[in-house]
Structure formats: C-alpha cells, structure tokens
Image (cartoon, helix red, strand yellow):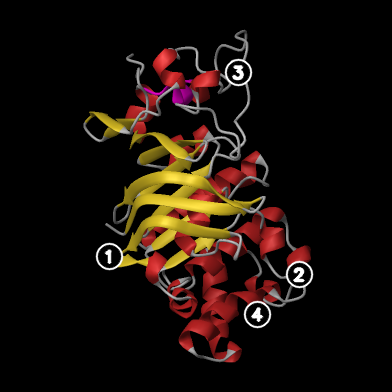
C-alpha cells in the first residue's frame, strides 16, 4: 500500500474547545490506484487531505489520534522539516483554486522551478530545461513565453495545468487532488481530468481525488469513499457503489444527479441540511435526514461494517437493491 489511514481523528479548536472534525476515518490506497473521496461541502474531505499533507492550520488544528502511513512511515510522527522533505517529493497536492494557490507576483517559471531548486539544490537557470519540459508535459502552449508570464495572464484552465506541473515536478508516489476542476467550465474540466488520468498512468502514481461531482468519480476512480459529517459512511469499488449503493446517504447522492435521457423527471434532493460539526445529533448523524431511520438510529452510531467483499457501510439498516 502507498497510503494507509488508520482511525484518523482530526480536531479543531472551536470556541476554546477541541472538536473532532474528522472522526474514525480509515482507508487504504494501493499502488497505481485512483480513490475518490466524495460528499457534500463541510463533510470533512479537505480536512482529511490537509491531515495527510501535514498542512492543518496550527495551532488551531491537529491530528488528535490515529495513523497516516505513507509507505509504512507514520506521517503524524514526523517533524515539520521532515514533512517538508516528503511534500512534493513523495506526496503532492493540487489545491482547489489555482489563482489563490499561485503567487501573483512571481512568474510561472520561477514558481515551478522553486520546487526543483529547493528539493534538488540546483539553480533556477539549471532548472529551466526541466521546468519547460514539465510545462510541455501538461500540454501548455507557448511554453517559452509562458515561463516568464504571471498567473493573472493565464486562463483558469492554464493555471490549473501549472498547478499539476508543480505537483508532478518530482514524480511523487501519491497525488492528492482537492476539487481540481471546481472553478473550470465543463469543457476545460474534461480536458484537465483527461490530462490527470494520462499523467498518473504514465508515472504509475496513486491518487486521492476529492470532489462532490459523481460524474468525475465515475470517470476517474476505481474505489470510492463516501463521507458525511466527518465520518466514512460507505466505501467500496466504484462499480459496486454506483450499481448498488447501500447507505441511504449514498442513495440520495445518486438520485440527486440530473438524468441525461428522461428530462421530465423532477430532480430529487436530500431533505434537511448537513448538521453543524459543533452540534451533531445523537446516534447516526444522518438519521434526521434519513427516510429509513428507526428508533435505534437516533440513539446509537452504527459501525462501519463489511457487507460484501470489499464493500463497507455505516448503517443499522443497509439498503438492499
């Protein structure tokens, strides 16, 4: 396994009290696998990724317990200098918004080259041929001119390609992509996703793809993790999750997708709202929004239980069919 997350609990200090934002999260990512992490905004997807990268806002966020093993090394036990050597080298991340992730006052060439100069100890001049090759690899046009341009001179899709070049500069074993196409139009989304798929295959790299877009999950991943209110509620192979979802929340997400053929059907939705992390209900956190909830659901939080080979669900009454 490239990555093993075991019983992860990540807490933030809210109103002078440490509150779990992500609780009891466990999953694996194998070599060359693309795993999707899906759920509504505020469910804990990005906090999970920041925990793995060691980029939680300090002193207000911390990994309270659990293990994050990258090729057997527990990242939660490493110092900040040790994590800096691992970031970019063995594990990289593409962030949600490229305009705020790229420095507006530094050129594209300098920013991509900075990864190489810091990790390889070479000058920017010596790094330039490698930077140009990276820009070419992510299929950017006019790379010689682009090298000297600034982020504001690029379109959203071009900036995202620069972010991919930054993430892949040192050939990491694991790429975390946090909503990599959110700010892009549909056509550019498809191009960026196809590029990411191509590059991960070429470099035999594993990927954790974080998104709320089920279409992206279906297109890109082999395995899926569904999160709700800081916990994993279902996980399994992509085909199993899409063909036979077992948790009521996953079923609700599937039904909320607009149909391509029958446009006469009304778009379905999940009633209610995601609960505040500081005011979670007793028992199953999804029970107040669930059409199948019974008395025990409001009293006891179910465990994540295996129901089929490699298919796990956190529900007292998993849906069958």
Q: Is residue 46 magenta?
A: no
Asked which secondary structure carries label 3, the reply is loop
For mark 3, what is the residue?
Answer: 271
Tell me which numbered mark, 1 or 2, is placed earlier along the sequence: 1
Tell me which numbered mark, 3 or 1, is placed earlier along the sequence: 1
In the picture, which quadrant includes the C terminus? top left
Report the residue at 44% width, 12% height from top: 292
For mark 1, what is the residue?
Answer: 72
Which circle marks residue 251 in the picture? none
Tell me which numbered mark, 2 or 4, is placed earlier along the sequence: 2
Asked which secondary structure carries label 4, the reply is helix
Q: CA distance from mark 2 to mark 4?
A: 12 Å
Residue 28 vertical position relative to residue 245 in the rendered view, above or below: below
Q: CA distance from mark 3 to mark 1?
A: 42 Å
Q: CA distance from mark 3 to mark 4?
A: 48 Å
Residue 197 vertical position relative to residue 159 in the rendered view, above or below: above
What is the x, y in percent for residue 89? 43, 73
- Left or right of 143 in this view: 31: left
Q: CA distance from mark 1 to mark 4?
A: 34 Å
Asked which secondary structure carries label 1, the reply is loop
Chief SS of the magenta region: helix
Mark in the foreground, 1 or 2 = 1
For mark 2, what is the residue?
Answer: 104
For mark 4, what is the residue?
Answer: 110
């Amino acid at each position: 396994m490239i990555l093993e997350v075991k019983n992860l609990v990540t807490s933030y200090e809210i109103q002078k009290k440490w509150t779990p934002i992500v609780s009891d999260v466990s999953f694996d990512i194998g070599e060359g696998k693309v795993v999707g992490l899906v759920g509504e905004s505020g469910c804990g997807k990005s906090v999970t990724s920041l925990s793995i990268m060691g980029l939680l806002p300090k002193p207000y966020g911390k990994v309270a317990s659990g293990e994050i093993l990258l090729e057997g090394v527990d990242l939660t036990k490493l110092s900040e200098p040790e994590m800096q050597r691992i970031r970019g080298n063995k594990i990289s991340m593409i962030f949600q918004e490229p305009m705020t992730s790229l420095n507006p006052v530094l050129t594209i060439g300098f920013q991509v080259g900075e990864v190489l100069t810091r990790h390889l100890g070479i000058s920017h001049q010596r790094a330039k041929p490698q930077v140009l090759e990276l820009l070419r690899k992510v299929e950017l046009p006019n790379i010689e001119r682009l090298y000297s341009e600034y982020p504001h001179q690029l379109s959203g899709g071009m900036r995202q390609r620069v972010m991919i070049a930054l993430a892949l500069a040192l050939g990491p074993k694991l790429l975390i992509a946090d909503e990599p196409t959110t700010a892009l139009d549909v056509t550019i989304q498809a191009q960026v996703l196809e590029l990411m798929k191509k590059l991960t295959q070429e470099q035999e790299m594993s990927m954790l793809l974080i998104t709320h877009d089920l279409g992206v999950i279906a297109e890109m991943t082999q395995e899926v993790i569904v999160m709700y209110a800081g916990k994993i509620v279902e996980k399994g192979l992509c085909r199993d999750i899409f063909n036979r979802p077992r948790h009521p929340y996953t079923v609700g997400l599937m039904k909320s997708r607009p149909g391509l053929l029958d446009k006469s059907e009304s778009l379905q939705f999940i009633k209610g709202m995601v609960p505040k992390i500081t005011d979670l209900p007793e028992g199953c956190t999804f029970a107040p929004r669930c059409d199948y909830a019974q008395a025990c659901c409001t009293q006891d939080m179910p465990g994540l239980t295996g129901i089929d080979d490699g298919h796990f669900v956190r529900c007292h009454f998993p849906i069958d069919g």
